[in-house]
Image (spheres, helix red, strand yellow):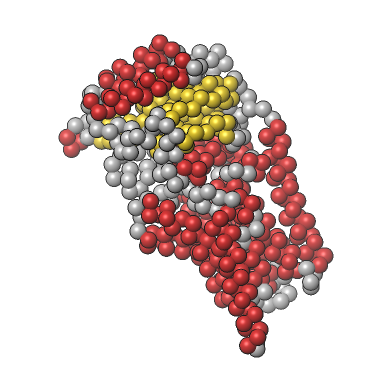
Amino acid sequence: MGFGNKWKRMMEAVLAISGTAILVFFGNGLEPRWPLMWIAFVPVLWFALGSTAWQAGLVAFAGMLLGCLNYWSYFGVLGAPHAAWFINSGLIALMFAVGVLLMRALVRRGAIWRAWIALPAWWVAFEYVRNLIWPHGSGGSLAYSQLNFVPFLQLASLAGPWGMGFVLMLFPAGLALGIHLWGPARGQAVRVLGVTVGVVAAALLFGAARLAARQPGPEVRVGLVASDVSHGVVDPGAPALRLFEQYAQQAEGLIARGARVVVMPEDLAVIVDPDTGGADGMFQPIADRTGSVLVIGMNHVKGAGQGARHYNEARIYTPGAAARGYDKEHLLPPFETSIFTPGTSRVVFAAPGQATGQMWGVAICKDYDFTDPARSYGRSGAGLMLAPAWDFHVDAFWHGHIAVMRAVEDGFSLVRSARGGFMTVADDRGRVVAENASDSAPFATLLATVAAGHDRTLFQSWGDWFGWFAIALLAVVLARLVVGSRGTPSD
């Protein structure tokens, strides 16, 4: 290869890396521009299919790694060392590069259709397995780049984030294959492009049909309160009671305006057994007098001395019943894992005053980063999920709307009240009915009406079936490499 050709290939590599890095940087992350992710990987895939293996792997790795710089500052907000970003983003970039090399190897062997599904299958298998062992669950899934693309979001009701991630990878793979084959095999290029567009069109047609259907059940007036005036967790005793009294006043105001349930943020103040009567004596009479439900987050200390345990509890007040608590199941490391004991049970209760027996449930903030416990609540028939939360301001949209995907997956509406973020009300189609920032007032409030009936979904019934389906597809793809090759050999 002459100097001119080497220079040309180097420039093509730089352009491919830059194109993918820029598109991933802005298309994914904490405030994603969802259309960009549909083409983000085309530059490096186009380059890889016409390059040597080491060139393809290096360009794919670099493009993805640089794109992941959109999370650099977030790791600082979380107090994580820069090494944590390199480890996490390096693994993501490495897995992407391996998937690109797998796709390229199959194209070299003439296995075009297996090459088409190779990268999506590899990527979803990686994301699904990581979700099983990672303390942040599905939090890093590329599917969350599409939270604002509501028609496509409906695919989550069938296959969860795994199905969405598969299609999101399948589209650029099909485009890159079509471009690569256009000269030497135009007919096959047209077929690949046609099927690729057909898959996306089918997903969007399903989404449009689901959006046109009405969520079942009655509508409920919901209220949310959040305040960023107190930046930490308030001490037990008089300071905690003063804060609770302020929240109680706001809750009563929302109830007077028609709210049948009021949700407040998580981990607001410490209460210590047996001194829970102050909080209960403040909120339970409101529930009894108004027939409304109140949910508020507390750091509940149970036991004494060295045997004392802290629970991140959502304390639930329903009319005519004793206060009950839901303890947060999935804790944020290291902030919460060093303090709290994880919960092991769920809370589902009949909506007060509903003759039809509508069921409501409660889970807290990071619980919604995982496909369960939300799926368990869906299987219990919950039509409305109440979610106290606490975000980091910078992740207000991203983290708050991850929970909205759980609503789509499992057929319930969501009422999520976060300090350091947004108060969000969304229906089971992922449409945000109302939203307000927690720092919009000393005590910000939100009042909205949302459907509260449960709508059964395939994902709720079958669970993470598409994650296993992707692993099976990957096995078929890898078998093609093992069994033999035909067409142009790999280098």
When the figure is inspected, residue 255 is found, relative to residue 13, above or below; the finding is above
The reply, left or right, for residue 316 in relation to residue 153 is: left
- Above or below, 41 against 198 in this view is below
Residue 118 image offset from top left, x and y in percent: 63, 61
Give residue 271's quadrant in the image: top left
Give the residue drawn at x 41%, y 49%. 135
Left or right: 108 with respect to 243?
Answer: right
Question: At which x and y percent is residue 198?
Answer: 75, 51
Where is residue 162? Give x, y as percent: 58, 48
x, y percent for residue 128: 52, 51
**What residue is rendered at 48% in x and 48% in y?**
139
Q: Is residue 114 visible?
A: no
Tell which residue pokes out farthest to the left in this image: 305
In the image, 84 versus 34, the foreground residue is 34
Image point 31% across, 27% down: which residue? 243
Question: Is residue 249 placed above or below 417 in the rendered structure?
Answer: above
Q: Is residue 336 above or below residue 66?
A: above
Q: Quadrant of the C terminus?
A: bottom right
- Corner quadrant of residue 180: bottom right
Task: Pick the quarter of the image with the N terminus.
Answer: bottom right
Q: Residue at x 78, y 56 (%)?
A: 194
Q: Nearer the viewer, residue 368 or 357?
A: 368
